[in-house]
Amino acid sequence: MCTIQGISPDMIANNLIPAYPTHPGEVLKDEIEYRKISQRSLASRMGISYKALNDILNARRPLTTATAMMFEAALDVPADSLMRMQLRYNMRKAADDKSFMERLNQIRKYAAVL
């Protein structure tokens, strides 16, 4: 968390939590639209099915290490940045799952008595 003397930490941009997590597919979709590359031609160039590519771009499928590296090869978008985005997306989705968070709280209670 960033701090600046005299400024509330809630008002510093680097400390803000987005209203919803961003799936890396959203960024990739914007990138290929900006470059005017069709999804079909990109899927063909990457050697994956159009459906798999479309599912990633529409956040219906997670980005894997292999697909991140393929996107890096095809679009020169750093694979490690895409994977960090996927990790943040996964963590945020898990944190938004109330039943999972309750389970974690139960585990923490158990760990506290050990």
Image (spheres, rainbow, N blue to C red):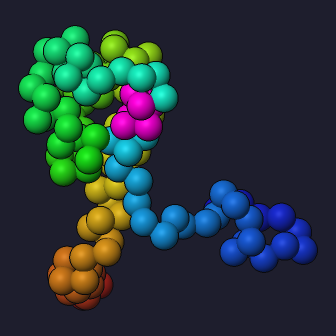
Q: Is residue 2 above or below residue 75?
A: below
Camera-nearest residue between 47 and 10: 47
Q: Residue at x 17, y 15 (%)?
A: 44
Residue 111: in sight, yes or no?
A: no
Residue 105 placed where, x, y %?
26, 84
Q: Residue at x 32, y 71 (%)?
A: 95
Judge from the rendering whether residue 98 lies leftward or rightward of residue 10; answer left or right.
left
Report which quarter residue 15 is drawn in.
Answer: bottom right
Q: Quadrant of the N terminus?
A: bottom right
At 31% across and 75% down in the image, what residue appears?
96
Q: Which residues are magenta?
A: 28-33
Please say whether residue 103 is one of the residues in the magenta stretch.
no
Quadrant assignment for the C terminus: bottom left
Image-quadrant location for residue 28: top left
Can residue 64 be spotted in the picture? yes
Q: Residue 9, image x and y in percent?
A: 72, 72
